[in-house]
Amino acid sequence: MSNIVNVGGASASDERPTVTRRPGVWREVWRDDMGRTGLITLGAVLFIILVGPIIFPFQSQSFGTSSASILQAPTASHWMGTTELGQDVLRQFLVGGRISLYVGVMATLIAIVLGAGLGLVSGYYAGWRDTVLMRVTDFFLVLPTLPLIIVLAALFGQSILITSLVIGLTSWPQTARIIRSQVLSLRERPLVLRVRSLGASDLRIMGKHILPNVAPLIFANLVLVLSGSILAQAALAFLGLGDPVQVSWGTMLHNAFNSGAMSEGAWWYVLTPGVGIVVMVLAFSLVGHSLDRVLNPLRRGGR
Amino acid sequence: MNARYFVRKLSTLSVTLFVTASFNFLLFHVLPGSPVQLLARSGHFDAAARAQLVKLFGLNRSLVAQYFIYLKNLLHGNLGYSYVYRKPVSTVLGSAIGNTVLLVGTATVITVFVGVWLGVVAASRANTLVDTSITVGSLGVWSMPDFFTGMILIFVCGVWTHVLPISGIETPGLVTGLWGHLGDVGRHLVLPAVTLMLVNAAEFSLITRNSLVDVLVEDYMLTARAKGLSRRVIIWRHALRNALLPIVTATALYVGMVLGGAIQVETVFSWPGMGLLIYNSVEQRDYPVLEGCFLLFAIAVIATNFISDLLYQVLDPRVRRT
């Protein structure tokens, strides 16, 4: 809240509060038990995903040569066992994490740019533009997301690029709603009136004065959308709509489920990618909830 | 209830339904690469079959005319023919809807009880170890994809211990009599319903907790305590009623989520409902069935939203007056 009060002051210092505020937010998240746990977990997950494939020498492409090498329980040479094709589960897990994260991040960027952009325009201009945009937003908010994503993926393809697009294009409405309600109150601040009377253009006001003030909110929302996107990608891949070449954690679970790993009791093949998804999503959710608590004491957007 | 409010909501409802139908038409009939367009262009048909297709969808007419044909078919409950089952889509859907309603309904009832109860427990012991455990536990369960929860339960209850059936809705030919049959279906229902419940109960508990924590610091809570009311009465009778609004709002979004969950859970447990139908129709590219399922899911969500809006009116006198 303090940034808004500060911003209401001299227009010359209006950019400073948001800039100096950043480290404060992270310090508070770090002080929060949930936030610290999330940040540490997230660091560990990112390290494993990004550095793991470089360190571990296993070949992901090598297939098993005998029936004994198929769905093998963890051994000294295959720490997490093997897949139904005799591939190393750990190596596939390390590479697959990158795909899951990549789709999640791409989809989130699309959703946030769309959601924040529409929310900004809608809240700033109000009037008929707001009415039209919010009607569209409400329509997409109402459509069941996962079924819609499945339909779009089934119709338009399964490459990781299309998957990212499909998830991104269906995940923006809530962000738009939250940003809009914040912008609606910001545009009534004295600062905005003052800058406008000085002759600043709408674009400049939105970019220089309103956007920096909603940026923390956008960021908190981004982390939560990221969790949702990773889950959506996993579900899509599990249902057989993942990229067949770029194996993600969801695709691994799809392969495990459809190759009889369940009835063979190959828990290592199921738990490895599954736990990966849960830990990554949980880490993002913990950070997101903590950020939300720090940035938004009222917590409740919408109505 | 305010009649004008009702009429306004009703008109919004009809507009939304209309837009949904049009959106569906755009996706499945108009866009390049949409099933109807592909079907008409594919070389697998002889002249007579192609002529029939063209006539059915009005493909030789203008887009506007096709659109009206589509709407007319829709209003008559004609959703087209399944490529795979070779039956009308409405018949295929009809045999699956009941199973999904049974699964989602059961899961919802448990979800509300477990979720709200956990939320109340957490809120009434806010910032204690109990609260933290419930909140973190809920977040943990919320972070699990439904299908993965299902797979774990299959390992625990089906592969390692054999306590519960892990696939299908009944054991064919094994049980006789109405009660035997009902019991069998009930046993098959346990794991899918629990899986579907877990993630949603986690969400409900988080929302209830946050909403209740906000209410508990209000002045009228102090008044209630000053009147000498017991803790139990204060929380369950006074606070929870006021904390209900965000929960009702969440319910509207819940339906979309639970249907997404049902697709995954029905796939994992081979539960013969609409979710499994969606999975199969995606795998076999049976687009008319996919279209029908999606339309029905959208209608279900829109209808629930409508009901939750009306409930809002009943629950919150402030909305009622405006």
Image (spheres, rainbow, N blue to C red):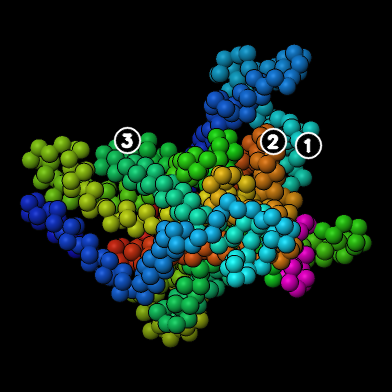
Q: Nearer the viewer, mark 2 or mark 3?
A: 2
Mark 3 belongs to which amino acid? Arg
Q: Secondary structure at mark 3?
A: helix
- Local packing at callout 2 (Cα closer than 10 Å; few below 14, some 14-19, many 20+) is some
Mark 1 belongs to which amino acid? Tyr
Q: What residue span does the magenta drawing correspond to? A: B157-169
**Residue A161 appears left or right of B90:** left
Residue drawn at the location 62% of the way across and 46% of the way down: A240
Q: Secondary structure at mark 2?
A: loop
CB atoms of marks 1 and 3 within 8 Å: no
Residue drawn at the location 70% of the way across and 59% of the way down: A70
| Cα distance between the residues tagged 1 and 3 | 46 Å
Front in this rendered view, residue A84 or B101: A84
**Residue B189 appears left or right of A153:** right
Q: Which residue is mark 2?
A: B286
Does the segment drawn in magenta span residue A118? no
**Residue A21 in sight in this render:** yes
Q: Which residue is mark 1?
A: B85
| Cα distance between the residues tagged 2 and 3 | 39 Å
CB atoms of marks 2 and 1 within 8 Å: yes
Q: Secondary structure at mark 1?
A: loop
Does the segment drawn in magenta span residue B158? yes
